[in-house]
Amino acid sequence: MLCSPVCFADVEGCSDGNTCFLRDTVYTGDIKLTCIQAPELNQPHGIAARDALRAEVHSTIMVVVANVGSDGKPRVELIRDDGLNLGLELVRRGLAKVSKSCNDFAYGPAEDDAVKAALGLWSSPPHSAE
């Protein structure tokens, strides 16, 4: 199991907008960002979400464990050393939606702001090509 509740680990890459590969002394494997639902790579904004997440990950990062999903993958928040919460940042940019199960009060207003600004997933009409 991944550290509990907070540790620092190396993120070696992200395969989509909410899944990254983590390397730690206790756990090595995929993790999922908690509180967000990013589009699949073949959906509008899916590649943009993955690329935005990749661009914000800088090797060692703080990992805050929320829980473990039914798929056995840890659900975490990834926080850079400058305090940027990567999942919340994707929501702010309109590149991910807030999960219905999210109980973190910061995410809802961030999604509301993205909707009002018609960012990413909330743009009209959605971009078909990335």
Image: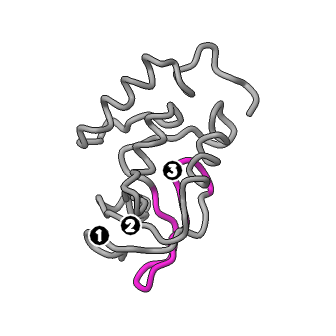
Disc 2 secondary structure class: strand
Q: Position of residue 12 (x, y in %)?
A: 59, 70
The label number, if any, that marks residue 6 in the structure image: 1
Residue 78 against residue 127 in the figure, above or below: below
Q: Residue furthest right?
A: 129
Magenta stretch: give its range.
15-32
* Disc 2 crowd, CA 10 A, few/some/many (<14, 14-19, 20+): some
* C-alpha gap between disc 1 and disc 2: 7 Å
* C-alpha gap between disc 3 and disc 2: 16 Å
- Residue type highlighted by circle 3: Asn
Magenta stretch contains residue 23: yes
- Identify which residue is drawn at 51% across, 18% down: 118
**Circle 3 is placed at which residue position?**
18
Residue 30 against residue 114 in the figure, above or below: below
Q: Earlier in the sequence, mark 1 or mark 2?
A: 1
Q: Is 66 left or right of 125, judged from the image as shown?
A: left
- Residue type highlighted by circle 2: Met
Q: Position of residue 30 (x, y in %)?
A: 51, 66
Residue 118 against residue 31 in the figure, above or below: above
Disc 1 secondary structure class: strand
Mark 1 vs 2: CB contact within 8 A: yes
Q: Position of residue 14 (x, y in %)?
A: 59, 58
